[in-house]
Amino acid sequence: MRRIVINRLFGAVIQVLIVTLLAWLLFYVIAKFTGASPAQRIAGKEASPQQIALVARELGLNKPYWQQYVIFMDHLIHGNFGFSYVQMRPVSQILWPATRATASLVGGAAVIWLLVAAPIGGYGGLRPRSIGDITGRVLAILGMSIPVFWLAPLVSYIFGYQPTQGEFLGLHFLPVGTSVFPIQGYVDFGQNPIQWAYHLILPWITLAVGFAAVYIRFIRTMTAEQLGEDYARTARAKGASTPRVLITHVGRNIAPTVTVLLGADIATALTGVFFVETVFGIPGLGYTGLSAIENLDYPVITAVIIVAAIIAVLANTVVDLLHGVLDPRLRRASGV
Amino acid sequence: MTTDMQAIDLQPSGPAARPAGLRATAWRRLRRDPVSMFALSLLILLVLAAVIGGPLAAHLTGHGPNQQFPSALANNGQPIGVMQRTYEANGTTHDPHGSLFILGADQLGRDTLVRVLYGARISLLVATSATVLALIIGISLGLLAGYLGGWVDSVVNRMTETAMAFPNLLLAVGLAVVVGPGLLNVVIIIALFTWYYPARIVRGATKSTKQMTFVAAAKTVGARPRRILLVHLLPQVWGPLLVYGTSIIANNIIFEAGLSYLGVGVPPPTASWGQMLSDAVTSGFYQADLTLALVPGLALVITMLSFNLLGDGIRDALDPKAGR
């Protein structure tokens, strides 16, 4: 067991290292050849080659690449993500609130998609080809096919913008100026938890739709499979009620796999976060990263990529390790 | 001795003949599934729309895909809506043939219908070429990793794991910013971020097929690794790949649209669905006329839906456990 844990942690460290190397290569080496280097960016478009060289020396960008990378990594390990030359403040100050906002968004969305998917998927697995199952499957395939960058503006339009025009779904019955949900904006949880949730409801739902679809299908297949197993038949034969069989017997067998899937999907969710954050104006990692890309603010872009990668790798690793704890069968298989 | 060799040589034709039977059965099952056939016909329509739909619509309406019609914008800059005609300044109708905007115009006065059809071209072109490129990379690495094992396998495995655990859109956008926009760049970027999917599938399939007797037989008769890889192992991985192939194309269509939406896809004025959506949303015009966001969005949703339904159908058809 210990060997597995050490192996897994070692793998996670390697993954983070690969990502830092890639991000650094992209923005500090490749960018130099495409004429979008950090020195060029700071010196400005009209800067002479001498001025650019001066800025490069100031930033230490004239040193050999390996030295630059070592310095870059040294700063990173000490929590120094550099200085944003667009926002004129240390990147670490920008990152922390952004990470909190993104975590609120992804975490809340995950709760919603699990709460929606578990009953629909479970029912579908229990009664295949029933009306409920078919409805669930149609909803799931629709949800899978709707791109989040289309859904986000639509949701914002229907629930945020339209009521302010006194309209809902094309029907004029509201007084003009009604505000059902905020169109944009974000309130930190520490400031006001109720406002925090109120501002995040639409973004949560938007982000959750695609994932709920995938989880409905997954939970449905798993439930159907588990119900065919001997233990489920035995439990039923003993007279256990259907909810009891589903929750205590089947649910416990599915939960570890769903947890692992959840860990892997954190990375996918961080992608969807871009669009949701920009449409709803949530100052999270995606929003920060995108505006940094527009401004070619390299320290911020690099930091956002690395932080996002660390979150994704961490989620994956924790969930993988947790899998061993949650699923006794794995513990035995690994010889502990 | 000679007879023994012949006996071994005949061996590969045994298992190799069976997948052909499975393939025929799968196709027969797929043909009987109305949902899959519906999805397939939608996809054929989409390809037709992409290949001839754009020029045809441009010819019939008399509007080029990038042609801007100032008369299609009202005085407040609001573009005209569905089935509306453009008028001369004095209030008379234009040439009746060229004045009708079937799906309205966008914020620059361009014909939405013509643009959405031309956009299908970009979507399909980018998604399929990126998929082919990703498949070439993925299949080669997967075959090598599965067949050779050892350190090659470890390296490929580590690479795919890293790629999977990674929110790749941000890096893709960063890469697009650094290397600059362009059709070929977008294709390469998408392929760079999707190859790991087929690689994992092929690696798994190769690993299990490698153990089969017909591979051992091929080795015994002196087949070189290259022949074993290409002639014996490669044909075996198509089944599992086919199921994922449809979802890879669908994901790449979304990927391309996402990149265009973020302004780093195929550069404007070339019409693409993501670009049209982004134009409608960032300009805010979609709040006054929802058609601007609905048309490219629905085009994306219908395409995705067709690919997803067909993928489900193929999976069911290939499932050996399902009734024949």
Image (tube, rainbow, N blue to C red):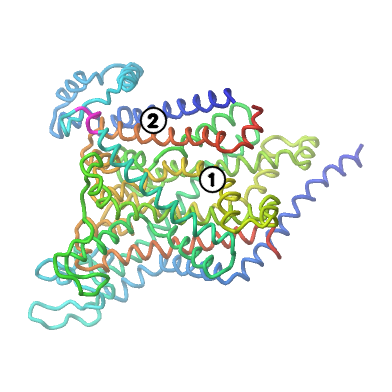
Q: What stretch is highlighted in magenta?
A: A90-94
Q: In which quarter of the image is the N terminus of chain B?
A: top right
Q: Quadrant of residue A122?
A: bottom right
Q: Mark 2 points at which residue?
A: A22
Chain letter for mark 2, please. A
- Mark carried by residue B197: none
* Relative to B83, B31 lies left or right: right
Residue B111, compared with residue A3, is above or below; it is below
Q: Which residue lies furthest to the front in this view?
A: A239
Secondary-structure class at tag 1: helix
Q: Where is residue A197 in the image (x, y as percent from the top left)?
A: 28, 49
Chain letter for mark 1, please. A
* Relative to B206, A33 lies left or right: left
Q: Does the magenta stretch include residue B148?
A: no
Q: In which quarter of the image is the C terminus of chain B?
A: bottom right
Mark nearer the N terminus (2 vs 1) = 2
Q: Position of residue B19 (x, y in %)?
A: 71, 54
| Residue at (42, 56) in percent of width and height | B125
B237 or A78: nearer the eye? A78
Question: What type is the residue that disc 1 sits on?
Answer: Ala
| Residue at (53, 67) in percent of width and height | A134
Q: Position of residue A146 (x, y in %)?
A: 39, 59
Q: Name the residue under label 1.
A: A255
